[in-house]
Image (cartoon, helix red, strand yellow):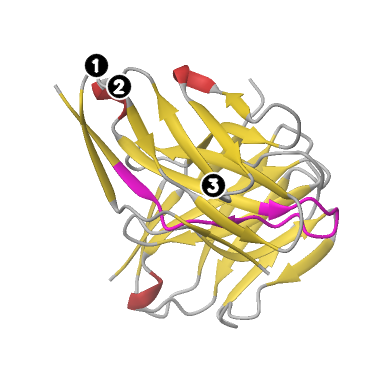
Amino acid sequence: AQSVAQPEDQVNVAEGNPLTVKCTYSVSGNPYLFWYVQYPNRGLQFLLKYITGDNLVKGSYGFEAEFNKSQTSFHLKKPSALVSDSALYFCAVRLSLLRSYIPTFGRGTSLIVHP
Amino acid sequence: DAMVIQNPRYQVTQFGKPVTLSCSQTLNHNVMYWYQQKSSQAPKLLFHYYDKDFNNEADTPDNFQSRRPNTSFCFLDIRSPGLGDAAMYLCATSRDPGLYEQYFGPGTRLTVT
């Protein structure tokens, strides 16, 4: 079984400040972890993923995420938020097994960046 | 640019009137997915195709059907839409199962009157 939790429905941050969107996961094995962003009335857009290797993953638009196996977390971060980063963010997890390729999505976190 | 295309972007149908949503991809990906998303919630997987193999989620209502006539196209048929079926429908693709992320289309927003 696999599950992912995004404990915050909404995150508010001022433009220029660092942002963190939290994600924790539960899988019975090694995880593959993903972050997606969704702008209003659009589909999800891939930001970054952790498969193996370096725990710090860099992705699109200046976002990065750190895989922490002991805390089963994969928090999304950005050093300096932009108003245009305001969107809905989804974390997803799947097992690192070929037959388990269907990801499980978190419920999403709405990021609001204030000017 | 390679992409996932959904048509139409907005669809209005009447209660009980069949409707078909379409998805096409130029990525040549093996796996295609249909998701239902309501009110900024997590996307809910309805079914997916791995090549020609159809996989239905256990809780997908019988009212929802899908067809994949070839690698590039996939259709979602709603046989008798109810008011509760109003949602955003997202099509996604991915390469062979492995290390790969999903690519999503822009979605079709379905309204049921």
Apparent side of residue B39 relative to residue B67 in the rendered image (left or right): left
In the image as oriented, which residue stretches furthest toward the front?
A: A70
Q: Which mark is drawn over residue A81? A: 2
Q: Which amino acid does label 1 sit on?
A: Gly
Check the picture and name the quadrant holding the C terminus of chain B.
Answer: bottom left
Q: Can residue B106 be seen in this view?
A: yes
Where disc 2 sits, the SS reads loop
Chain on which label 2 sits: A
Circle on res. A73: 3
- Residue position for label 1: A16
Tell which subunit mark 3 falls on: A
Q: Does the magenta stretch include residue A105?
A: yes
Q: Which residue is drawn at 60% across and 83% down?
A: B62
Q: Do labels 3 and 2 share a chain?
A: yes
Question: In which image quadrant can residue A53 be found?
Answer: top right
| Res A115 → quadrant | top left
Would residue B63 be found to the left or right of residue B88 on screen? right
Q: Residues within 10 Å of mark 3 (few under 14, many from 20)?
A: some
Which range of residues does the magenta coloring cover?
Answer: A94-110
> Which residue is drawn at the image coordinates 56% and 23% (left, top)?
A59
